[in-house]
Image (tube, rainbow, N blue to C red):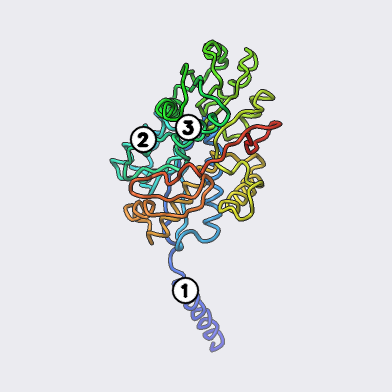
Amino acid sequence: MKTQFAKILCVVTLGLILGLLGCGKGPEAKPIKVGALFAVTGKASNLGAPEAKTAEMFVNKLNERGGINGQKIQLIVKDTGGTKENAVSMTKQLIEEEQVLAIIGPSTSGETMGIKDICQEAKMILLSCAAAETIVNPVASYVFKTPQKDSDAVKLIYKTMKAKGISKVGIIASNDGFGMAGTVQLQKLAEENGIVIAISESYDGQATDLTDVLTKIKGKDIQAVINWSIVPAQSLVAKNMKQIGLDVPLFQSHGFGNIKYVQAGGEAANGTIFPCGRLLIADVLPDNHPQKAVLTQYKKDYEDQYKEDVSTFGGHAYDAILILTEAIKKAGSPDRDKVRDAIENLSGIVGTAGVFNFSAMDHNGLCMDAFEMLTVKDGKFALYNP
């Protein structure tokens, strides 16, 4: 009897000890919800697909390390298909139903401009992965973006043209948010940079042939063509120029930073000149370059995991989630207003697009030195050497 009692006492005691140890651990901290709007499918999937993959990879690695101050990130990705209507609907879902801390994305400028006011009115942090300068100019207190400025891309293109003796150009652009915003900057900055725009035309993003518009350009006796778009149709420009004998340099926007556009353009894409971040030429950067370690590590992680070439678009998502997580750390808690204030005061944040230095007047945090001038050589990206 005594032996049986002793066994029971031992079991009860062990249970109490295990219970106390379990209490010592406490409940797992509530995750931090972050919304993500990416064009994973649709006409802008060359942007959105690598963005979604990058954000998920970043968050998984962060969570494996324990998250931020013991709180893991719960990433809620929604596929907008690249349409403004979907972006608006999904933004409202993330704000009202999911009650996320912040939203990263969308992939395109048109989508971003469609939700900018919604986020601002709801005091929802938005870290856009789209490029149009109108996203952050004028400044909206809760709206930020990670790609470099349109105006800086234009200035570098014009500077390169002047060095080549080019002064008369023709512009073509997609009739979407990015194309229209870029055209505004190209026209605005032309005169002060000694550039004459002989003709400016737009085309539909779904176009499968641009020979008509390029024939108009050819008739103006221009010295170079500038194409401003992010849609797959930009791959047609070089092909169609070659077909009609328009033998002048082709300059693309910083929306050309995906090797798929080069592959689609084929041999005609060789010689294309465009401003871009350094991710695409990370391997040739000197070891002491401030971005070298970040760029090479991200490139390796992405390509090892997804078995495809990295793109600058995925880098925009990397930068967005990096900036958000650094701001949460700086704020000390996932309090939205404190995190917003922290983003505005971040400096020296080394990302894929450049080194970010935000302020109350600058919600992009990058300047012209975030760009390099690149070209296409033998079907691959390379540094442009005049």
Q: Earlier in the sequence, mark 2 or mark 1?
A: 1
Distance from disc 1 to disc 3, alpha carbons, whole Å, reads: 65 Å
Residue 266 percent coordinates (x, y): 68, 25
Residue 176 percent coordinates (x, y): 44, 25
Contact (CB < 8 A) between labels 2 and 3? no
Circle 3: residue type: Val
The structure residue drawn at horizontal position 44% and vertical position 25%, both measured from the top left corner, is 183
Q: Nearer the viewer, residue 165 or 220?
A: 165
Quick one: SS at disc 1?
helix
Distance from disc 2 to disc 3, alpha carbons, whole Å, reads: 26 Å
Q: Nearer the viewer, residue 242 or 193?
A: 193
Answer left or right for 111 relative to 378.
left
Circle 2: residue type: Ile
Q: Quadrant of the N terminus?
A: bottom right
Give the answer, above or below, for where 24 lies relative to 111.
Answer: below
State the residue lying farthest toward the right. 378
State the residue lying farthest toward the left. 121
Distance from disc 2 to disc 1, alpha carbons, whole Å, reads: 49 Å
Give the answer, above or below, for where 314 lies relative to 269.
Answer: below
From the image, tell me which residue sits under label 1.
19
The structure residue drawn at horizontal position 65% and vertical position 49%, both measured from the top left corner, is 300
Q: Residues within 10 Å of mark 2 (few under 14, many from 20)?
A: many
Q: Earlier in the sequence, mark 1 or mark 3?
A: 1
Q: Nearer the viewer, residue 7 or 269?
A: 269
State the residue lying farthest toward the bottom. 2
From the image, tell me which residue sits under label 2.
115
From the image, tell me which residue sits under label 3.
154
Q: Residues within 10 Å of mark 3 (few under 14, many from 20)?
A: many
Q: Quadrant of the C terminus?
A: top right
Q: Quadrant of residue 182?
A: top left
The structure residue drawn at horizontal position 54% and vertical position 52%, both measured from the top left corner, is 60
- Whether residue 201 appears in this view of the structure is no
